[in-house]
Image (cartoon, rainbow, N blue to C red):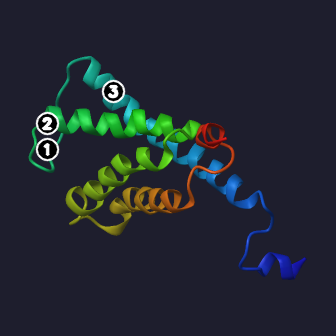
Amino acid sequence: MIQKLLSPISWSANAAALSSLILRLTLGLLMLSHGIPKLINLINGNMEFGDPIGIGAPASLILTVFAEVLCSLLIIIGLWTRLALIPLIITMVVAVFIIHINDSLGTMEPALMYLLSYCALFLLGSGRFSVDAVLKK
């Protein structure tokens, strides 16, 4: 039992697939809690938003809503997962290295955790329990 616990390889054939599912659901649902309020602002015409990369507040808001809402939904169901992760990774790179670069680690930490988790999921892939897997068959 201890040998299996300390093993550097997967515990079972399902370990990677379950890990991917857990990451997809957790990251997708948690990011929706950030994206839905922005979507509501966008729908209501409230374009007050930061412009960290110099493309204008409305464009920044639209791109952020696209990443945080649409891409999160795609990740939750496991459809085009790696492609959907690219806008989220870019959004978190902007959050970490532009918006929060001069903040304390405690303030930067959530964006950094999302960024690194998205990178791990990108490497891991959507897994067997995803729409991607169903479409591949």
Residue 50 located left or right of residue 28: left
Check disc 1 and give the amino acid type: Asp
**Residue at mark 3 to residue at mark 1: CA–CA distance:** 16 Å
**Residue at mark 1 to residue at mark 2: CA–CA distance:** 5 Å
Check disc 3 and give the amino acid type: Leu
Check disc 2 and give the amino acid type: Ala
**Neighbours of disc 3 within 10 Å: few (<14), some (14-19), many (20+):** many
Who's the residue at 48% across and 57% down the image? Answer: 122
Across the whole image, how many numbered discs are drawn on residues? Answer: 3
**Neighbours of disc 2 within 10 Å: few (<14), some (14-19), many (20+):** some
Residue 39 pos. (x, y %)? 33, 27
Q: Which is more toward the observer, 32 or 88?
A: 88
Q: Secondary structure at mark 2?
A: helix
Residue 21 pos. (x, y %)? 64, 48
Q: Secondary structure at mark 3?
A: helix
Up/down of 18 relative to 31, above or below = below
- Mark 2 or mark 3, earlier in chain: 3
Up/down of 124 relative to 69, above or below = below
**Residue at mark 2 to residue at mark 3: CA–CA distance:** 14 Å
Quadrant of the rendered image containing residue 96: bottom left
Which residue carries the number 3 mark? 39
Residue 57 - label: 2
